[in-house]
Amino acid sequence: MSEHQVIECSTLQRINPLLEALTARINAAGEPAEKIRLAGELQQEVDAFLDCPNHQASRLECRNCRLIATLRHQATELVRGTGRLSAFQGRMGP
């Protein structure tokens, strides 16, 4: 089985490089505030992707795209929540 599966979706293929670049920038960011900001950008892109005008619930590719987008959305929520917690703990001191 291939490690990299290709989903035949022109919308995903168009937007995925941006999503991956934003994800890499989040992972590289050191400060919680920067992670939160980047996660917000990623979430906006993912939310727009979830509103895909070509979505057809009966198509497997569409269901897989929706799953990927939903997982990315959940990941941004985790990053933003963790970033806010880290920032809060930083203000509380040792």
Image: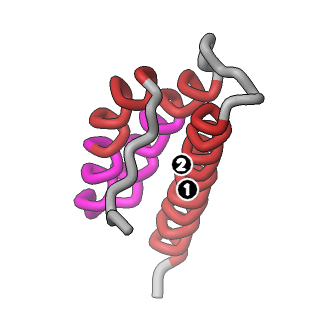
Secondary structure at numbered mark 2: helix
Residue drawn at (45%, 39%) of the image: 7
Residue 74, position as x, y percentages in the image: 63, 52
Residue drawn at (23%, 60%) of the image: 28
Q: Quadrant of residue 78?
A: bottom right
Instruction: Say which amino acid is labelled 2.
Output: Arg
Circle 1 sits on which residue? Answer: 75
Circle 2 sits on which residue? Answer: 72
Which quarter of the rendered picture does the N terminus lie within? bottom left
Please give the range of residues in magenta. 21-43
Secondary structure at numbered mark 1: helix
**Which one is nearer the viewer's eye here, 89 or 72?**
72
Q: Quadrant of residue 4?
A: bottom left
Residue drawn at (45%, 72%) of the image: 90
Residue 54, position as x, y percentages in the image: 60, 14
| Left or right of residue 18: residue 77 | right
| Left or right of residue 32: residue 79 | right
